[in-house]
Image (tube, rainbow, N blue to C red):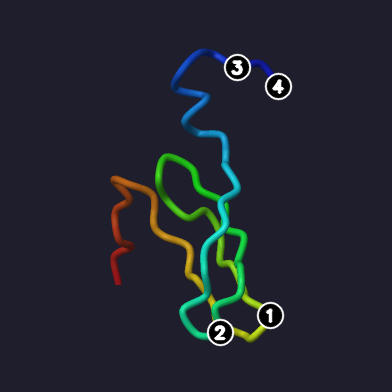
């Protein structure tokens, strides 16, 4: 994969450790441009939900 400067660097997912508010354990989440990319599940079952990308439009119903 070729990188094209700062923009691509910001899109690359970055792992980050978060503390579970339920049990205090560590949860690894992946961030891209400050947004959580996918749901992260703690061993106790607590889920940190993925966030919608910035500028995402809600689907029409």
Mark 3 or mark 1, earlier in chain: 3
Mark 2 or mark 4, earlier in chain: 4
Viewer-side residue, 58 vs 33: 33
Mark 1 or mark 2, earlier in chain: 2
Give the residue at mark 2: 23
Give the residue at mark 3: 3
- The residue at the point 56 percent across, 51 percent down is 16
Quarter in which the C terminus is drawn: bottom left
Image coordinates for residue 12, horizontal then vertical, percent: 56, 34
Q: CA distance from mark 3 to mark 1?
A: 35 Å
Identify the mark at residue 53; answer none if there is no mark. Answer: none
Q: CA distance from mark 1 to mark 4?
A: 33 Å
Frontmost of labels 1 and 4 is: 1
Identify the mark at residue 1; answer none if there is no mark. Answer: 4
Local secondary structure at mark 2: loop
Q: CA distance from mark 1 to mark 2?
A: 9 Å
Mark 1, other Cα within 10 Å: few <14 / some 14–19 / many ≥20: few
Viewer-side residue, 25 vs 32: 25
Give the residue at mark 1: 43
53 is higher (above) or lower (below) than 8: below
Dot 3 and dot 4 residues touching (CB under 8 Å): yes
Mark 4, other Cα within 10 Å: few <14 / some 14–19 / many ≥20: few
Frontmost of labels 2 and 3 is: 2
């Amino acid at each position: 994969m070729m990188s094209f400067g700062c923009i691509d660097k910001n899109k690359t997912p970055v792992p980050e450790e978060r503390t579970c508010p339920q049990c205090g354990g560590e949860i690894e989440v992946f961030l891209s441009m400050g947004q959580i990319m996918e749901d992260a599940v703690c061993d106790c079952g607590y889920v940190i939900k993925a966030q919608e990308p910035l500028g995402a439009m809600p689907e029409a119903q």
